[in-house]
Image (cartoon, rainbow, N blue to C red):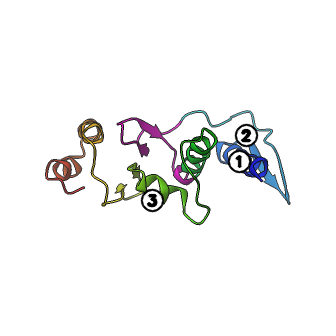
Amino acid sequence: MGDFLDKCASDAWDIISGRKKIIGNKIVLCECNELKEDTNQDYGWLAPNGKFYPADFGEHQAWASQYLLEQYRNGKIDLKINEEPGDVLCKMGFILLHNPHRYNFSVTRDYNKRITNKQKNFLIEYFENRNMNDWLNKIYQDEI
């Protein structure tokens, strides 16, 4: 079962990354020469240790799945099949910086988890660099 899940996760990641595509009921290698290499540095997951993992628009759940699968393979976590990958990361203390509808920046996190000092420092620099003063005020007032 584990090999099957590994293959599914790998194929899903390759499809999202543009290396493979679905034709009919088969997954095949993409013949396009322009593979997607650049990742938007504005959106992604912020770990409790302050490390930022960028993810392009619409790819944050796939990234979460891949990250959790790697953690599971390394014996660091137990996976629960009935939970969404993004929800699991939020429960682990990750913060998602995203733009769900391409017009409204959003921060998603588990409010039962405290923002770590490393996350707060990253967010302050992130908001300052992007002139996001409203969000900067929210972080200073502990409203995020």
Q: In this view, does 15 lie to the left or right of 141?
A: right
Measured as percent of width and height from the top left, residue 14 is found at 70, 43
Helix, strand or loop under label 1: helix
Residue farthest to the bottom, as pictured: 82
- Residue at 25% of width from left, 55% of height from top? 144
- Bin the neighbour count of mark 1 within 10 Å (Cα to Cα): few under 14, some 14-19, many 20 and up: some
User: Which residue appears at 28% of the width and 48% of the height?
Assistant: 115
Residue 46 locus on image (x, y percent): 39, 43
Rendered image: mark on residue 15: 1
Task: Pick whichever of labels 2 and 3 is earlier in the sequence.
Answer: 2
Identified by mark 3, the residue type is Pro
Q: Give the range drawn in magenta.
A: 39-61
Residue contact between numbered discs 2 and 3, judged by CB atoms under 8 Å = no
Q: Residue 100, which numbered label?
A: 3
Q: Which amino acid does label 2 sit on?
A: Arg
Residue kind at label 1, given as amino acid type: Ile
Say whether residue 131 is left or right of residue 140.
right
Q: Looking at the image, which residue is at 50% across and 43% down?
A: 55
Residue 48 percent coordinates (x, y): 36, 42
Q: Name the residue under label 2.
A: 19
- Crowdedness near tag 2: few (<14), some (14–19) or many (≥20) residues, C-alpha within 10 Å: some
Q: How far apart are marks 2 and 3 (CA)?
A: 24 Å
Dot 3: few (<14), some (14–19), or many (≥20) neighbours within 10 Å? few
Q: Mark 1 and 2 residues: CB-CB less than 8 Å, in contact?
A: yes
Say whether residue 54 is magenta. yes
